[in-house]
Amino acid sequence: MEPLSRRRLLRSGAVAASAALAGCLGSLGVGDGGVDAIELERAAGPGPDRVPLAVADRPIVLDFFATWCAPCIPQLDTIWAAAQERPDAYVVSVTNEGNEAAIRQWWGDYGGDWPAVMDPEARATSTYSAPRLPTTLVLPPGGGPGSEVWRHVGVARADAVVAAIDEAAATSNVGPGEQR
């Protein structure tokens, strides 16, 4: 058997990674009706046990956070303030942590009145390209990966999030508080 050269080994790894990624993207893409098909398990906050990351009739705010992330605490305050001004926005916070009890306790201390979901395999984190924390995305109703109208890494201002929610609603011809 011939030894693997570095180039051949890298090429084999790239082919295998491409095949695996293609399989993952096929199962994580946009579902019927243009609404993102990713649903994650709720760790804290209100909502069903499995929470979709998108809805068809409301602007979407995705907040990527971690319990160990110090700037994520003031960012949750920002998201909370924006959610109070735009209560019809669909807000979901996503963590790649998997310890439900720890997330629930942290969420009780710092979280909002929307669902916090677990993404331990980093499906949403990867699909939405949110490797740094905190990251906040605002998408139009029915929006999925790549459709965001606003992205911010770090602690944002509440008025910027509100303006992005308004822009997302206008993008879809659905105003805040209106139904499609």
Image (cartoon, rainbow, N blue to C red):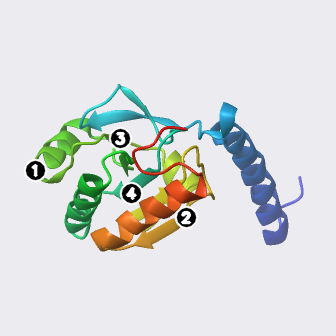
- The disc, 4 or 3, on the residue closer to the chain's N-terminal end is 4
Residue 47, located in which quarter of the rendered image?
A: top left
- Separation (CA) of disc 3 from disc 2: 22 Å
- Separation (CA) of disc 4 from disc 3: 10 Å
- Separation (CA) of disc 2 from disc 4: 16 Å
Q: Is residue 133 visible?
A: no
Q: Which amino acid, by three-letter code, is at mark 4?
A: Phe
Q: Find disc 2 in the rendering and name its residue.
A: 149
Mark sitting on residue 109: 1
Q: Find disc 3 in the rendering and name its residue.
A: 117
- The disc, 4 or 1, on the residue closer to the chain's N-terminal end is 4
Circles 2 and 4: CB distance less than 8 Å?
A: no
Q: Residues within 10 Å of mark 2 (few under 14, many from 20)?
A: some
At numbered mark 2, what does the secondary structure look like: helix, strand or loop? loop
Q: Residues within 10 Å of mark 4 (few under 14, many from 20)?
A: many
Q: Nearer the viewer, residue 131 or 49?
A: 49
Judged from this view, the residue extending furthest toward the top is 49
- Separation (CA) of disc 1 from disc 3: 16 Å
Q: Find disc 4 in the rendering and name its residue.
A: 64
Q: Residues within 10 Å of mark 1 (few under 14, many from 20)?
A: few
